[in-house]
Amino acid sequence: MPGTELFGAEERKEIEDVLSTGIMFRFNHDAQRNNIWKAKDFEAEAKKITGAKYALAVSNGSAAILAALAASGIGTGDEVICPPFTYIATIEAVLMLGALPVFAEIDETLCLSAEGIKKAITPKTKAVCLVHMCGGNANMDEIMAVVKEHKLKLVEDAGQAFAASYKGTATGLFGSAGAYSFDFFKIATAGEGGIFVTNDENIYKLADSYCDHGHDHVGNNRGMENHPIIGFNYRISELHAAVGAAQTRKVPAIREANLKNKAFLQKELSKVEGISFSKLGDDNGDSGTFLNILMPDTETAKRTVDEFNKAGVAGFNYWFTNMYHFINQWEHIKGLKTASKLPIQLLGAPQDYHNLDIPKTQAVVGRLISFGIRCTWTEEELKALAAKISECATKALKPVNA
Ligand SMILES: *Cc1c(COP(=O)(O)O)cnc(C)c1O
């Protein structure tokens, strides 16, 4: 959790600025705020890293993906191709907008594959919601070719992939809009926060209004602003934005340390025959937040996890059975259990969610064990971790009676 590892004087100073005026609201109050605009600062820092023309700081990454879908015109009855391996917010956002998730296959990039997307297209498909998982990047050239051929919209949930890129373009900027999360577990944190990005002025304006009760933010009398659309409240507070701005300034250094630590571990672990790693669409565009180990098969991966637990190895995720990021654990989604009726319950699910045919995804996630990279690891800690992982994996790869 690199951002949280580096919480210190810089974050405290930004918070103090806000406390010095007491203006915790991001808009208006020009006379009292002493020219302190932390949400705007956070947006400016995010634009520096991503190169996005427009950035909007919002209350969290879930709101950012919701706004990205809504501002892209995705709504009731639209089929949206989604990955079955993602943080649940992606699927929730699609459902809350009345759209219908269609699950497609991922590949060893841990993201939707072009082939998987192609197979899931129907006449009702409106969009692809691509998720750049585990800090990496999808195979964008192949995916964009399918998106263009079938005239689909692309929205990117880059919740875990801030500071990741593909051939020089930031993840999140390939389609109409993208989203990053700055929750407590990401490369940088605002405590709670998210950033919506787009290069399209109209889509930005829609998101800006959507996330603040439809306000157009023109003029300096909030009570008399126009409301071009119906929206809701997904605003970020100045206190959270203050932390987000300070943390985002640290991201280039965090990424550099992450990549160095990840490269060290990969070099050591590739000496173990049987260990391989997830792929990247572009090797140069990794944010380095996760070391993603692929074991030869699910059974070996499960044995490796058992060995880790016996040896007291910590800091890893086995998504296949132990985490909420994989469809096998989404009984509430499959059963459409809701507090109140959603459009999908009237329209019907586009697939039988209980019997999805996703063998490639099951195989990849079954083989996958991910370690969160720490940017503050010392050389001794890295060596010790590499040795422990190697030892446990070697045991798991050679069962006693083999
Ligand atoms: C973290 C995350 C989110 C949600 O972000 P929050 O800030 O926690 O709301 C959405 N999508 C992905 C892929 C994430 O990892």
Image (cartoon, rainbow, N blue to C red):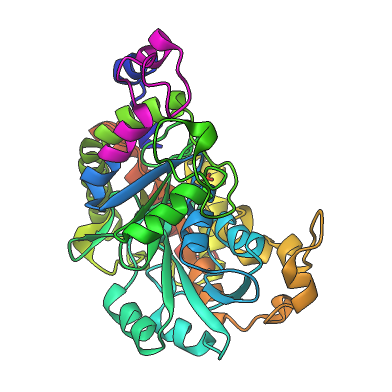
The residue closer to the viewer here, 144 or 315, is 144
Confirm whether the magenta stretch covers residue 32: yes
The residue closer to the viewer here, 392 or 250, is 250
Locate residue 272 relative to residue 352 in the image: left or right: left
Q: Name the residue located 51 percent from the left edge and 54 percent from the top edge.
A: 228
The residue closer to the viewer here, 29 or 3, is 29
Which quadrant does the N terminus fall into?
A: top left
In x, y percent, where is residue 140?
30, 73
Locate residue 278 relative to residue 398 in the image: left or right: left
The residue closer to the viewer here, 382 or 91, is 91
- For residue 271, which quarter of the picture? bottom left
The magenta span reads: 16-45
In x, y percent, where is residue 106?
46, 74
Locate residue 164 relative to residue 90 in the image: left or right: left
- For residue 203, which quarter of the picture? bottom left
In x, y percent, where is residue 229?
55, 55
In x, y percent, where is residue 7?
36, 23
* In the image, residue 1 above or below residue 401: above
How many tags in the picture? 0
Q: Name the residue located 28 percent from the left edge and 69 percent from the top edge.
A: 281
Confirm whether the magenta stretch covers residue 397: no
From this viewpoint, is residue 105 visible? no
Locate residue 36 relative to residue 302 in the image: left or right: left
